[in-house]
Amino acid sequence: MEKLRVAAITLTACALTVVPLSAASATAKPHARFEVSKLVIVGHTRSYDVADADAVVKSRIQVKDHDKKFDPTSVTLSVTEKVSGLPASSTTVKARLAGKGKVVSNWHATITVAKGSVAPGTTATYCIALVKVADGTAVTPVRVSAKGLVGRDCFTVTNTPTP
């Protein structure tokens, strides 16, 4: 009789611990349909000099699709230039598809800063402010702020005066 009572108490205790765990898993936050999961500027710590040649900076973008139905057809970057003391100006750069898997598609973009576009002796900072991803459907494209994705979303360009 005592063994039966202990078994009943044990079963009741197990049932009570299982219910909160299953309730917690049922209320888990669902993933977005798709997201820009990674953004990297190759050479983001380097300072580019545009006194003699164009600065060519490469970036990599990763789009993750959780339900495996989103098919991105285009990725564009909005790049903002900030020179101290002047208002910020921005430009748009298109990315090209570099590879695609079941869940992740990788995109590459090349940002070119023209020779002499920065005044001699000054430094400009270029940051990716927005990443836009569109698919072939009529669904509104994803717009993701680049801030907080990786922290590698800016690079500097200088124009050192030649002696």
Image (tube, rainbow, N blue to C red):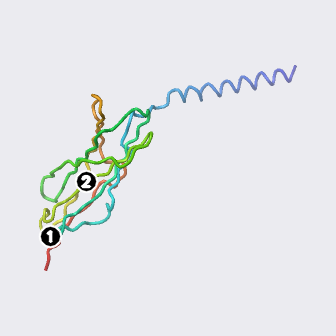
The residue lying at 15 percent from left, 52 percent from top is 88
Quickly name the residue at label 2: 127
Taking 22 as reference, is 75 left or right?
Answer: left
Nearest the eye: 56 or 159: 56
Q: Is residue 35 above or below residue 90?
A: above
Residue occupied by mark 1: 121
- Which circle's residue, 2 or 1, is located before the other in the chain? 1
Image quarter hosting the C terminus: bottom left
Q: Quadrant of the N terminus?
A: top right
Farthest top residue in view? 1
**What element does badge 1 sit on?**
loop
User: CB atoms at circles 2 and 1 under 8 Å apart?
Assistant: no
Q: Secondary structure at mark 2?
A: strand
Residue at left offset 21%, top offset 58%? 112
State the residue in front, 98 or 28. 98
Q: Is residue 131 left or right of residue 21?
A: left
**Label 1: few (<14), some or many (≥20) within 10 Å?**
few
Three-letter residue code for mark 1 = Gly
* Residue 10 position by quadrant: top right
